[in-house]
Amino acid sequence: MKKLVIFDLDGTLLNTIDDLGHATNYALEKCGFKPHPMSAYPFMVGNGVKRLIERALPEEERIPERIEELRTHFVEYYGQHLTDFTEPYPGIKSLLIDLRSEGIQVAVASNKYQSAVEELIHHFFGDIDWAAIEGQRDDYPVKPDPSIVFRILGECPTPKAEVLYVGDSGVDMETARRACVDSVGVTWGFRPIKELQESHADTLVHNAEEILAIAKRPGL
């Protein structure tokens, strides 16, 4: 049985794509660039806001000064609109409650900047007892670097064999691999199943209830 389940945020716990897309389009338009359709954004997210901005810009405009200019506009807008369209995926709230009732600790590891992660978690899951809530910090590399997992393990010491990492992308599966913990790839998120398979997810799940069963499995 697992003692700690670490969740990615965007595309795993919460469907945030429309709010991320609207914030990016706001930043683009503020700087004179054309917006993208919402359908383009699932393949831009996953590596933090700076990488999202870089991908949204025309290739010739991907210079540090321009990226930082758009990032400022993004944060300005997103800070006021991050819950406009965002909502938990089906079964997630019940899953978190059930995990805690089984004595299994839960944590968040996200490439979204820290203040936004905290606001989203407190807004949607404020009644859940979280062992750790970790987002992107300037002094740490982003996923798939495993530093964020190690930060969580520093706050919530747990043998790696008793840790489960849950995410929706190849970045998440690689993070789990580098941290040497078991991984679960969720198929309801932003990336295709093929990406999870090619990134060697230990297990794929199609609904939240399956995660509880995996976490409670004897010997895991």
Image: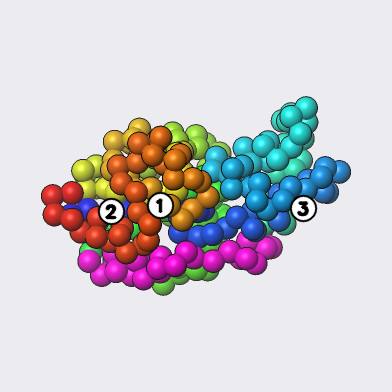
Q: How is the image coloured?
A: rainbow
| Residue type pointed to by label 3 | Tyr
Residue 60 found in image quarter: top right
Label placed on residue 81: none
> For this view, does 30 lie left or right of residue 157?
right
Mark 1 or mark 2, which is nearer to you? 1
Question: Label 1, on which residue?
Answer: 186
User: Is there a contact, CB below 8 Å, between mark 1 and mark 2?
Assistant: no
Q: Is residue 155 in view from this perspective?
A: no
- Can I make out residue 120 in this image? yes
State how far apart marks 3 and 1 are (Cα): 29 Å
| Residue at 47% from the left image edge and 64% from the top image edge | 89
Tell me, for residue 4, which label it has, or none: 2
Which badge, 1 or 2, is on the more N-terminal residue?
2
Q: Which residues are magenta?
A: 79-102
Residue placed most toward the observer, 10 or 37: 37
Task: State which tag comes first along the sequence, 3 or 2.
Answer: 2
Number of marks: 3
| Quarter containing the N terminus | bottom left
* Residue tagged 3: 26
Q: Secondary structure at mark 1?
A: strand
Amino acid type at image mark 2? Leu
